[in-house]
Amino acid sequence: MADDSCCKLIESSWNPVTGCTKISPACKNCYAERFALRLQNIGSPAYKNGFQVTLHPERLNLPLKWKKPRIVFVNSMGDLFHEEVPVPFIKQVFETMKTASRHTFQLLTKRAERLAEISPYFCWPDNIWIGVTVENQNYTWRINHLNLVPAMVKFICMEPLLGPVANLPLEGIDWVIVGGESGPKARVMLIDWVRQIRDQCLKRNVPFYFKQWGGIYRAEKGRFLDGRTWDGMPLCLEPVQSESGNLTNDDPAIDNNP
């Protein structure tokens, strides 16, 4: 996982599955792994297995209880398309998202091959967006698999961006998000890498969202690029704040106001 959301518009996270395994360079400093092990150490029941892939069927219907429309990031603490997550369980997740049509659900995976393989088993209503992580040029192949999915909105999350991407295949892509790595072992992201991606998006009229520079003190570094923020979105979505005005989470060990 790259961070706890794809962008700052996320209002809630929903984790019917927690845990994952590392499969590419972007996974090296996984924030979710650190967080899960910390929660395990303090005795959180949901993380008794640490960062092992764990299904949480008791969370399946949680979005149905949220009455106000929200932008929901699905599985901030794992990967829904991990090979250890059974297809029938993923189908249940999709049924909930379909039923909770007032919400917009954003899913992100590094397992693009499995996503493409099993996507025909699911219904893809317009409120389900799907993206893949592309951290450098070596992983642009994930986009080819993403384009096989019949979702209304398909996006690329390039966070953490770990190298230049000179040829970004943007055909069929509705949104590109770029961000630097955060945390104590954050790796460097060069400004020219970000500009290169931004310019490709502008040329192809693909909305470009620059999330953060990252680093240890990411709030201090901000998210300005060439004197401005870049807040491109695939659709005109007006974020509806939760009643607390903050991002909410389905895990009471993380947030007590779901």
Image: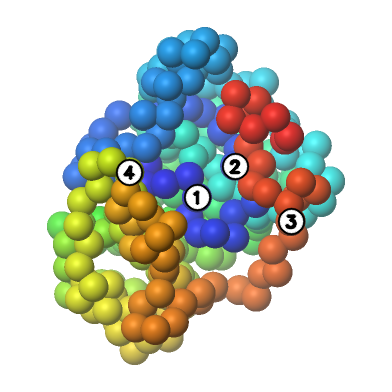
Residue topped by disc 1: 5
In the image, farthest residue toward the right = 67
Please report the residue visible at 52 percent of the width from the left and 21 percent of the height from the top: 55
Using residue 22 as the reference point, say whether residue 117 is left or right of it: right
- Choose top left, top right, bottom left or bottom right for residue 188: bottom left
- The numbered mark, 3 or 2, whose residue comes first in the sequence reads 2
- The numbered mark, 4 or 1, whose residue comes first in the sequence reads 1
Give the residue type that dot 3 points to: Gln
3D distance between C-alphas at marks 3 and 1: 15 Å
Q: Residues within 10 Å of mark 2 (few under 14, many from 20)?
A: many
Give the residue type that dot 1 points to: Ser
Using residue 254 as the reference point, say whether residue 162 is left or right of it: left
Q: Quadrant of the N terminus?
A: top left
- The numbered mark, 4 or 3, whose residue comes first in the sequence reads 4
Give the residue type that dot 2 points to: Ser
Q: Are marks 4 and 2 in contact (CB under 8 Å)?
A: no
Q: Are marks 1 and 2 in contact (CB under 8 Å)?
A: yes
- Choose top left, top right, bottom left or bottom right for residue 69: bottom right
Q: Which mark is residue 183?
A: 4
Comparing labels 4 and 3, the label whose residue is closer to the camera = 4
In the image, farthest residue toward the bottom = 203
Q: Residues within 10 Å of mark 3 (few under 14, many from 20)?
A: some
Residue topped by disc 2: 13
- Residue 65 is situated, as x and y percent measured from the top left of the image, at 80, 37
Front-most of residues 229 and 110: 229
Please report the residue visible at 30 percent of the width from the left and 29 percent of the height from the top: 21
3D distance between C-alphas at marks 3 and 2: 13 Å
- The numbered mark, 3 or 1, whose residue comes first in the sequence reads 1
